[in-house]
Image (cartoon, rainbow, N blue to C red):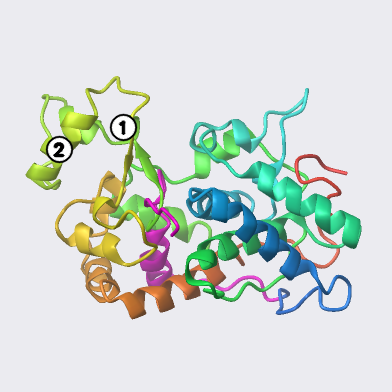
Amino acid sequence: MMKSFRLSLVFLVSVVVLFELIAVSHGGELRKNFYKKTCPLAEEIVKDITWKRVATNSSLPAKFLRMHFHDCFIRGCDGSVLLDSTANNTAEKEALPNQSLGGFDVIDEIKRKLEATCPGVVSCADILALAARDSVSFQFNKSMWEVLTGRRDGRISRRQEAVDNIPSATFNFTTLKQSWANKSGHTIGVGHCKFFSNRLYNFTGKGDADPSLNAEYAAFLRTQCRGLSDNTTVLPQDPGSVLNFDSHYYTILKLNQGMFQSDAALMTDTQSRRLVDELVDQGTFFTKFAQSMKRMGAIEVLTGTAGEIRKKCNVVN
């Protein structure tokens, strides 16, 4: 079974809440079965390799979801997060929020197979969107949401844009919502102590804990994160449901056990709190998550003749 910890840093489950609150309309030129004639085996190749790799590496679903999210949040879903730095440019990969991303080797493996099968046809941006879906779907042995395709790859990747624009784990609800609104736009992953230890040890600058964090949970976290200077410890973010991609995150959120300040922020707004109540239900969560992933995957996409189809995902042509 897929080991699943909730997404680190920027909590993809909040995508469900925020996309419900913010109207988004993008990706009109994306469509189902975009590669049906030009590369009919494309989606099957992505799924086969992704499932093979997830079967031996249960951390990949969280990694691909987070990578897809971080890609879409900078310049839209254009595969820019996959690009390496060059002598003249420091790429998004080097930004602090992206330094813990993983799974690039799997994307590269998929791309090599697709280039051997139908050269210059399938974009890296589409590969990433499909791999994110397929990695989560492995646990259920079925496709968990529809991925429309037809994205093209961007040629620009800048570290500073990722630093400036990826939402912080310390955001309150207002800044979190605005961050999504600017794009017109966690049930799995891990959390690094350095991104929430201020809630445990020095929330107001007086050596205190965040009062919105469950006191027993805070005490437990302090036994794991040894202080503000702990830069190495990594913890599961959904400890009551570590083996499943499910709605349990919303249950612990209602118990004030969200690890990050941005998690707790979802309980400070009447609308988002009402949605959290709804999303405790497993069926509702899966439906809303699928809708939200489809909408996120359409943010500011390049289509038609914009961008390019990279021959390798880590370098421009």
Q: Secondary structure at mark 1?
A: helix
State left or right for residue 111 relative to residue 245: right
Q: Secondary structure at mark 2?
A: helix
What's the magenta region? 1-28
Which residue is nearer to you in this view: 189 or 126? 189
Q: Point out residue 242 in the picture as x, y percentages from the top left corner.
A: 32, 53
State left or right for residue 100 relative to residue 48: left
What number is the disc on residue 193? 1
Q: Point out residue 230 in the picture as x, y percentages from the top left corner.
A: 30, 22
Mark count:
2
Q: Which residue is mark 2?
A: 220
**In this rendering, is residue 188 above or below 17?**
above
Q: Point out residue 120 in the picture as x, y percentages from the top left corner.
A: 90, 57
Q: Is residue 307 visible?
A: no
Which residue is nearer to you in this view: 200 or 282? 282
Disc 2 and disc 1 in contact, CB within 8 angstroms: no
Q: Image quarter for residue 40?
A: bottom right
> Which quadrant is the C terminus positioned in?
top right
